[in-house]
Amino acid sequence: MTIRIQNLNKYFNHFHVLQNINLDIQKGELIALLGPSGCGKTSLLRIIAGLEQPSSGKIFFNDQDISDKTIRDRHIGYVFQHFALFKHMTVLDNISFGLRVKPKKERLSPQAIKEKATYLLEMVQLDNLANRYPDELSGGQRQRVALARALATDPHVLLLDEPFSALDTKVRRELRQWLSKLHHDIQLTSIFVTHDQEEAMEIADRVVIMNKGNIEQIGSPKEILDGPANDFVYHFLGESNHISIGERNFTFRPHEILVSIHDPKQGYFQATAIDIRPLGAMTKIILQPQETAYTIEAHIPNTTLNLYKLVKGDTVYFKPIMDFEI
Ligand SMILES: Nc1ncnc2c1ncn2[C@@H]1O[C@H](COP(=O)(O)OP(=O)(O)OP(=O)(O)O)[C@@H](O)[C@H]1O
């Protein structure tokens, strides 16, 4: 299913929440809508689902204008942050629910429903938990059941609104990898809302960066990271240092820096290491350059520097290796 969003606007009273949104999504693509809180991601997703009406503009599924269709006629699978499973039903019954409540003429036989639900359970790797109740599952397992339930009715489009944001970091990371693989296998056109750039970059084929109801940039994770379209995108995508030394202005990410404890070479500036913190495979060093009032943050791979020798107050020499001019 391809999706086209054309000149879409949404007002809540006088508040212009979505401002002339245009977006083309290819068949089988996984798109992440990424942006700060309140930028309109969920509103856009709800309009695509048919849960909310746009103030103007059109939505096409496979070139067919579905703007006036109900959520039911759009064949959407929807997973929310807190997806409510039915507490009194087993995992298997939760997954098969959408199949069991179909109108009689569309409904599969009880045996076929059970087989399909079992197949979906295997797909989300929970076949050993078929007879558990939602209260007996971890948060991550519950979201996988929610996804299987959303897929049960063969949706044409899968919409996921921050599905992993209530889970802890480790589980989120596992589920991201799992979702990526699942998406690769089933190739269902999917839209994933998140405010977490790492999540978006890790799972999406293309990322749509939103800000205050506008699309700032659309591109693959690499295109966006290598070529942020503007100041907003650059700063949204992560921490950055800004310093002026003499006539020169530098803007660079914490990892875009070389740090040396030895004598300066050409292009290096002198600084004092005022804080040193381990960050796993990297070490974070806060530097106070000699020539500026502002500190800078450097993330240095542990393998590239004789860091064990470095202590607070030491003199070091640094050189930005990428400077980004806006
Ligand atoms: N039903 C509503 N009535 C009035 N204003 C609304 C309504 N729904 C959303 N808004 C406003 O529209 C803006 C966009 O909200 P939306 O939920 O789409 O943002 P978001 O990017 O998904 O944010 P978050 O990441 O915090 O969920 C916000 O300022 C919000 O307060």
Image: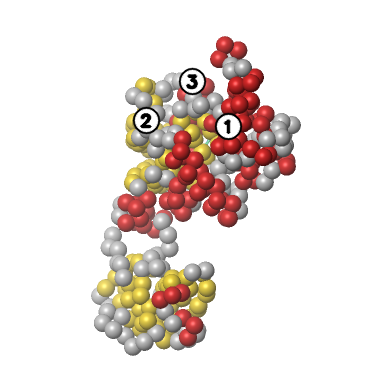
Residue denoted by label 2 = 2
User: If the image is split into quadrants, where does the N terminus sit?
Assistant: top left
| Percent of width and height locating residue 113 | 61, 23
Q: Does the residue labelled 3 lie within 8 Å of ligand 1?
A: no
Q: What residue is at 43 percent from the left and 35 percent from the top?
A: 187
Looking at marks 1 and 2 on the same chain, the residue that comes earlier in the sequence is marked by 2
Q: What residue is at 46 percent from the left and 20 percent from the top?
A: 69
Query: Which dot, 1 or 2, sits closer to the camera?
Result: 1
| Percent of width and height locating residue 217 | 34, 47
Q: Are marks 1 and 2 in contact (CB under 8 Å)?
A: no
Residue 135 versus residue 240 in the image, above or below: above
Pick whichever, 12 or 221, lies toward us. 221
Q: What element carries label 2?
A: loop
Query: Which dot, 2 or 3, sits closer to the camera?
Result: 2
How far is mark 1 from mark 3, CA to CA?
25 Å
Residue denoted by label 3 = 73
Disc 3 marks a residue whose amino acid type is Asp
Disc 2 marks a residue whose amino acid type is Thr
Taking the image as shown, residue 284 lies to the left or right of residue 171, namely left
Q: What element carries label 3?
A: helix
How far is mark 1 from mark 2, CA to CA?
26 Å
How far is mark 2 from mark 3, CA to CA?
16 Å
| Percent of width and height locating residue 196 | 49, 51
Q: What residue is at 65 percent from the left and 19 percent from the top?
A: 110
Looking at marks 1 and 3 on the same chain, the residue that comes earlier in the sequence is marked by 3
Residue 223 versus residue 258 in the image, above or below: above
Residue denoted by label 1 = 119
| Percent of width and height locating residue 194 | 49, 46
Q: Is mark 2 within 8 Å of ligand 1?
A: no
